[in-house]
Amino acid sequence: SSSSKSSRAEPVMSKQEMQRYDGTNFPWSKEVEQHLRDSFHLIKLRPLQLRAINLTLAGRDLFLVMPTGGGKSLCYQLPAVCSQGFTVVVTPLVSLMEDQIMYLKSTDVPAVMLNASSTKEHSKAVMEGMTDPKSPFKLLYVTPEKIAKSKLLMSRLEKAYKAKLLSRIAVDEVHCCSQWGHDFRPDYKLLGILKRQFPSVPMLGLTATATSSVLKDCEKILCVSQPITLTTSFNRTNLYYEVRIKEPGSDASISDIASLITSRYKEQSGIVYVFSQKDAELVASELQKRGVSAYPYHANMDPKDKSRVHRKWTSNKIQVVVATLAFGMGIDKPDVRFVVHHSISKSIENYYQESGRAGRDDCPADCIVYFGFADIFRISTMVVMENTGQRKLLHMVEYCQNMDRCRRSLMALHFDEVWDDEGCNQMCDTCRHAKDYISVDITQHAREVLQILELAASMDEKVTPLKLVEAWMGKGPAKRRKMIQTTALSRLQAEAVIVHLLLQEYLREDFSFTPYTTNFYIKLGRKALLLKNPTHAIHMNMRECGDRPAVNTSAAKTREEVVSGNYCPAQPQQKLLKEQSNFSQKRDLM
Ligand code: ADP
Ligand code: MG
Ligand code: ZN
């Protein structure tokens, strides 16, 4: 079926033929170059932009897949000014449309829009402009609703088509056509009418969603046969990905972040992403206390304050924005040298987007995420309403807990891409410290955890993740301590074991709603029964240097520096864990 991740059929164009479109000796090449400089004030096209622009100017239908911020818009804006008449751009959101119009105003490229709130006079002027041979605008932005519902618009488009003034049709965020995409919009389903009515007008679909099943679906819905699909890799080779373990309590990680910013990132621009508005205020003020020029940014702020923070950060008058997800759309600062996540993101896709605001100038930049036990459950209760929220969050947790696989390769899975370790080039912490962990048998630990949960269940008690860790570590009520086997694992190790059991489905989450909050509990999972089998064993990777990431590294450092840094020699951790469990048994007997 077309929903499978089947590889694309034989290419529409051979490689050699495709390479011809990287050239600059087409009839339009001079004009393209001139408008790039004089209208858009840009120096150079990015590699795939040139190919896309040549292909669409040659009249081919095109799907363009590039990550957000990759510069898709220019691939229809620049051809628009180099063509007769005007280009229709279908955009899902009025706000996106307004952004584009505002940007184009600054470039002197005439552009107009039509949406539900356009006035009668404005609409009338636009409709007339469409058949004016002098082309008063080069770009016409419309919502899909307008195409679907306005017969007047369709009739004007038809007139323009006959007069050869409809030069091109661009469908932005084209994945909105497909119900398999994450952002389906019903009115996009009706856009096939454009190609059916105007078959000789080249069409351009643009998206950051690379799934081939979604693209195939979009082809059908838009009635384009055999478009050429151009895809840039989502691999951001200049970004260094690192995960750090967050100590319980908020201060340790904030101090860690502050010292990073004041030393490694001294005078460099960055973003610290946080979980909530409250955290934004708190982390910003804690960073300020530690001498960092950091300001909060979140949805609940006065719009004036928001735009002031944004402006000052863009002009390097403040160094760091401490932001919630609200700081996203339209953030386009090229020289962001670090994006630190004070809490994990709710999915790998989110993490990719958020961390991807670093290094837009293609110079090295760092993406560091602080991985804390308690944060998993804070975010879990937040995404509980989303159908796939939990699964996506657990993928993010898996990404963080991972010690042996390249971080990039884990991200690539989510974009239907394969990036091997060579595609990483040691630009992630696991590739740099490939042998920095050991596999540990945690079967006995798992049994202890299960025993606590069984005991609680027998007493009809629910157990929160925090209570579970504390009970296991012997910090619960005294009478309970006598009934369970406590552990001598460190807190971080105990937490890591519980996360592992959750990821492996020995444990599972259990939500309950009160009128005021959502509570998160831990229950026995699908695989818990396996532990009744005395020969069943569970292994997990643990760091050789205890709990903390062994080494401080960054994109800027070489491997040699790293190795001569604070690298901990291997410890016989396996033995250590064994001794600890013996110790804990003894203590229980006391
Ligand atoms: P997308 O739609 O792919 O997310 P945009 O089209 O909004 O990305 O472009 C993102 C940013 O990149 C914009 O600020 C744009 O001006 C900039 N940009 C695009 N092409 C180039 C280029 N060739 N050189 C420099 N900046 C560019
Ligand atoms: Mg875009
Ligand atoms: Zn790697």
Image (cartoon, rainbow, N blue to C red):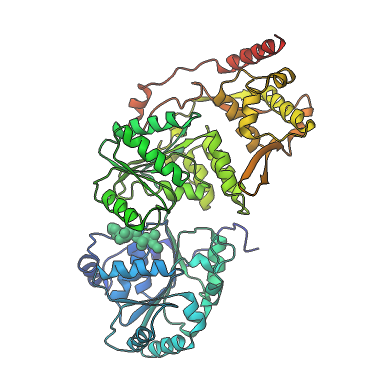
Quarter of the displayed picture in which ligand 3 can be seen: top left
Query: In front here: 229 or 235?
Result: 235
Residue 429 appears in the picture as rendered: yes
Residue 363's quadrant in the figure? top left
Residue 130 x/y as whole percent: 35, 86
Query: In front here: 5 or 381?
Result: 381
Residue 293's quadrant in the figure? top left
Identity of the residue drawn at 64% across and 49% down: 515
In the displayed structure image, the side of residue 296 where residue 577 appears, left or right: right
Quarter of the image with the N terminus is bottom right
Quarter of the image with the C terminus is top right
Residue 235 appears in the picture as rendered: no
Query: In front here: 400 or 51?
Result: 400
Task: Identify the residue at the far front of this view.
Answer: 515
Query: In front here: 194 or 490?
Result: 490
Identity of the residue drawn at 55% across and 44% down: 379
